[in-house]
Amino acid sequence: MRILIGKYLVLVLMISNSLSGLAQGIYFDSLYYSGPSETVSALAQIYATDSGYTTIGLHGPITHLALEKAHLSLSGEMESANFWSWPDPTDVIYWYGNAFFPTQDGGYLWGNVFSGPTTSIIKFDENLDTLFTINYPAVGDQSKQQYYFYETETEYIGTCVITNDSDTEYYGDLELIRLDHNGQILAQDTIEMFNQEYQLSLSGIHPLESGGFLVSGARLYDWDPFIAKFNDQGDLMNVFTWGNDLDEWL
């Protein structure tokens, strides 16, 4: 079953690459079982390379999944695989969305919930060896959710949502973070959005050729999409939002 699904996904990539002629990433979420029901494989991201395809996902028993990076040939056959497990064997790795950002040096940058309420930013090399880790445990009712990154010549620029979930307050702010390529924090700022009237869900951060970047996502409850525009210094310039009635969500 694993090979069949892998071949189907590779076919999608081959068609996509034939249109552009360039290696690119395709992001998706899927879940399938291999072997006993307590063993699961989750294939979440796949990238086209010059020699084949790289997949990133989870594999192992549900009680303690390991990250798995596999390299597939152009025909879809697995050629190699690397694994990485969260250091605490009693904890569970959680997977939310498109967590891995491929970096220009061949590694990956992860910014996601790894265990319980703790969000971690981890830089892996191409073999899934850890280069640096930044942990953010939840503080009271506040916690951080998945980071999205893009890369410049000197730094990684990312954004996430800081959520507050209590009996009296339920909202989300944006956080912007700048890291150098060694994991040193250059800047970290909190941006209040929509007067804290909504909790937010992010879908990405997008650099602009003219400088600066866009952050895209949606406001929860009314599910109105939004795009926030920032200049190259990380200052919020404009926020665009649109949507329909509460029962028409995007």
Image: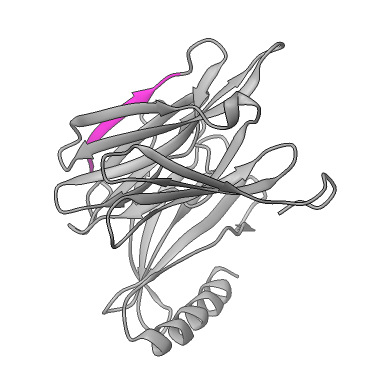
Write the start and end of the magenta stretch as one range. Answer: 130-137
The answer, for residue 90, to whether it is visible in the render is: no
Residue 121 lies in what quarter of the image? Answer: top left
99 relative to 162, above or below: below
Front residue of 18/227: it is 227
Quick check: 224 left or right of 26? right
Coordinates of residue 103 in the picture (x, y in percent): 25, 55
Residue 147, how many percent across, how many down?
42, 40
Q: Is residue 241 magenta?
A: no
Q: In the image, what residue occupies the spot 56% across and 34% down?
A: 63
Q: Main secondary structure of the magenta part?
A: strand
How many numbered marks does the figure carry?
Answer: 0
Frontmost residue, 30 versus 78: 30
Report x, y in % for residue 62. Answer: 58, 40
Residue 248 in sight: yes
Quarter of the image that includes the C terminus = bottom right
